[in-house]
Amino acid sequence: MKKIISGNEAIALGFTDGGGVFASGYPGTPSTETLEEVARLGEVYCEWAANEKVALEAAIGGSIAGGRSLATMKHVGVNVAADPLMTLTYTGVNAGLILMVADDPGMHSSQNEQDSRHYARFAKIPMLDPADSQDAYDMVRTAFEISEQFDTPVMLRTTTRISHAKGVVVPREKISPQVGEWVKDVPKYVMLPNFGKIKHVEVEERLLKLREYAETTPLNRVEMGDTELGIITSGVSYQHVREAFPNASVLKLGLVHPLPERKIREFAGSVKRLMVVEEMDAIFEEQIRAMGIEVEIGKNKLPLCGEINADLIRAALGDPVAEAAAPVEGLPQRPPVFCPSCAHRGLFTILSKLKTFVSGDIGCYTLGALPPMGAMHSVIDMGASISAAHGMARVNAIAGRDEKPVAVIGDSTFFHSGMTGLLSLAFNGGNALVIIMDNRATGMTGGQENPGTGKTLQGNPTRQVDMVPLVKALGIDNVFELNTYDLAATEAAIKKGLETPGPYVLIDRNPCVLRYKIRKPAMTVDQDKCTGCRACLKVACMALGLTASGERPKVQVDPNVCNGCGVCRQMCKFDAMHEIEGENNANL
Amino acid sequence: MPIFNIVIAGVGGQGVLMASRVLAESALASGLDIKQNEVHGMAQRGGSVISFVRMGEKVASPVVMPGSADLLISFEPLEALRYLHYLKPGGRLVYNKISINPSTVAAGLAVYPDDVEDQIAASCGNALGVDALAIAREAGNGKAVNMVMVGTVLKNLPLEEEVVTEVVKQVSKEKGVEVNLRALAGGAAA
Ligand SMILES: Cc1ncc(C[n+]2csc(CCOP(=O)(O)OP(=O)(O)O)c2C)c(N)n1
Ligand code: SF4
Ligand code: SF4
Ligand code: SF4
């Protein structure tokens, strides 16, 4: 039966229908819904790992034990999982093993725009690049077949417009999962140098065989049309190409590593002008040029940064694009903000006031870097807050600056890769104030469970790690609880942490209000008492707004948006705010 | 039938995704190919959201290009203005008149223009503004703004109204069916 599903849902269904046995992953936009959907479908065992390295290693174990396995993550997750990946390519697999990675061209919600196709070349493994939900569904099955036939992990790569775009999928006949033998094979799975040397040779031989496979597989498809123009493309770019030039000849690559050299040469020879359309890096183009084939239009006309679309492709060939009015300029931006009554708001209100350097991390709290708070001064990758703060403190000490850095990190990020930084801080007697925002949710990506929430991916009860003893066990003596809804107490606690030399940890335990659907009575502003001083606006809550014009506009609270945390009220020196009695029916 | 392009704009948390789903499922039920796409990721509320729904015999790209939308549905006036350039000449705009402050306005860093509706009227000759919140509340739940908005464009879709109604029944949670159907009808009457 036909269904409308996203690329992520299609991969989950393809895995469930394709003999999948075990899946593990770590949330990260735009990959997250894949594992959530495997769980929702409920037929195959799956779990959230503490980070991507753990997820891939667990999937490797699943494969060695004979079950078709899947690991899911976003592009930067592969950096975390790169260590197992680069040796997994040597060991190969037992049952089929897929690493699903979701890239984010255009950086809709990521810290960088890296192109995962480099990893397939780096690890010398095959990579599939679906062009819509149906492709994504079908390619899971093909990926397992390739994995088992060639004894290799396979990367299944999507981009945001594949993972999140919905299209029509017709599912195929289901394969029932078979669990193979759990084999002991020391030369295959123990990568001591002597075994590794033999394996490296095999990896190179495998790549040659895969090159042959690439020439004949239907994954790489020539659609002959007008021979004036030939376009080599893959993934969502294929759809944009079809949109822009329905009549052009197209070589659609489904297997994007290794490339089919003969097929490309033949295609290039059959068209007058050759164009390569790929998002981000010039990976096809450089390889095609290295084959000695002339590419007339490629990155000389198309961007290396951001997404590609039909208009960019038309423009690259000098074709007209639909006439559109210019976007209206000067409109107020609408960036995301902390939810009304999010516990992060109070923390950043105080950090902003104290003007101290904040070494940040990745999560909802990263929004603390934006105006009007502007209270986060470095954000690199998950877990960097604590380790970078440690380096800052060391250099500060050498320079004779007695300023202690603050690190801010969330619970999911702490479990992911913050714990090792804290351990190292304690080990080296560092000097940083670490604030852990333990809202018991992986908030940024939609509130997923993590080792601190007490629930598994399926929502079943499980062991909940206890943050305070954990932090103490890592070697920190000064560990105190924090309540960021109380601004005065928060300020006092942070000042104390900054004044006390050595590692110092504050833990806020207020839950994510969005994830746990927490509702409190809304605030209202007494218009007679409000002086329009705007002190309350510093908390950056979208429920607050100025009354229309006037010389000194006053503040109003939108009762459909306010969730009554009372943080803004603590900023008011004129006692102009109070709670509205009764239920909160906030629309958000 | 040429491809019919719809852009739905709004603010995170308003139910833009559900409205997109109803339109996509209705097209599928009518035997059309569809692509639907929105960019989401950040869980926090309050960001600008834009979703594309494309329907036709065969749809390739999931993305609607500026200047090519047949229909723009906006859940908020400022967002209507922000994405107005997606409409093709003569394209239809329906927007919810109830404004939501962007965080930049809430923080006093920017001002919400007081002539948003005038600007819309000046650049789009085929626009309709409705108080979707009032209609949703009348239907029984302020959260049904998304179904109201779908109702307002029923006549503009290349789909039978009954098909859309049927899909709304299917996708609604049991206790929400009645409210959603009233919201849909309320939107259609606006
Ligand atoms: C290596 C890597 N994996 C995944 C992500 C996606 N991601 C961004 S923030 C985040 C976790 C946020 O959770 P938490 O630290 O608990 O903070 P919260 O959002 O709840 O405030 C994740 C998984 C990422 N940016 N990098
Ligand atoms: S999703 Fe949770 S952590 Fe993120 S801003 Fe909203 S309340 Fe805060
Ligand atoms: S308006 Fe004030 S009380 Fe209401 S959610 Fe925002 S900060 Fe909290
Ligand atoms: S802080 Fe108080 S007096 Fe000042 S603008 Fe806000 S509500 Fe009005």
Image: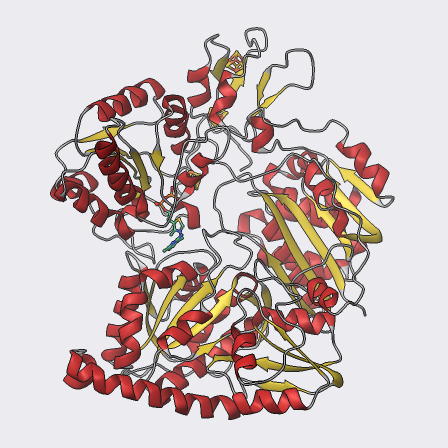
Residue B61 as seen in the image, left or right of residue A19 = right
Visual colour scheme: secondary structure
Q: Nearer the viewer, residue A51 or B179?
A: A51
How far across and how far down the image is residue A121, in percent? 41, 76
Q: Quadrant of residue A234?
A: bottom right
Q: Specify the farthest residue to the front.
A: A399
Q: How many marks?
A: 0
Residue A355 vertical position relative to residue A49 in the rendered view, above or below = above
Which residue is at a point 81% across and 50% down the rendered structure image?
Answer: B92
Which residue is at a point 50% across and 83% down the rendered structure image?
Answer: A259
Which residue is at a point 85% across and 46% down the rendered structure image?
Answer: B126
Q: Nearer the viewer, residue A233 or A18?
A: A233
Question: Does the rendering let one see residue A185?
Answer: no
Q: Quadrant of residue A492?
A: top left
Q: Quadrant of residue A142?
A: bottom left
Q: Nearer the viewer, residue A510 or A64?
A: A64
Residue A502 as seen in the image, left or right of residue B122 = left
How far across and how far down the image is residue A273, in percent? 71, 81
Residue A431 vertical position relative to residue B31 in the rendered view, above or below = above
Residue A178 vertical position relative to residue A452 in the rendered view, above or below = below
How far across and how far down the image is residue A295, in percent? 63, 78
How far across and how far down the image is residue A419, in percent? 22, 47
Question: Does the rendering let one see residue A41?
Answer: yes
Residue A581 as seen in the image, left or right of residue A421 = right
Q: Which quadrant of the figure contains the N terminus of chain A?
A: bottom right
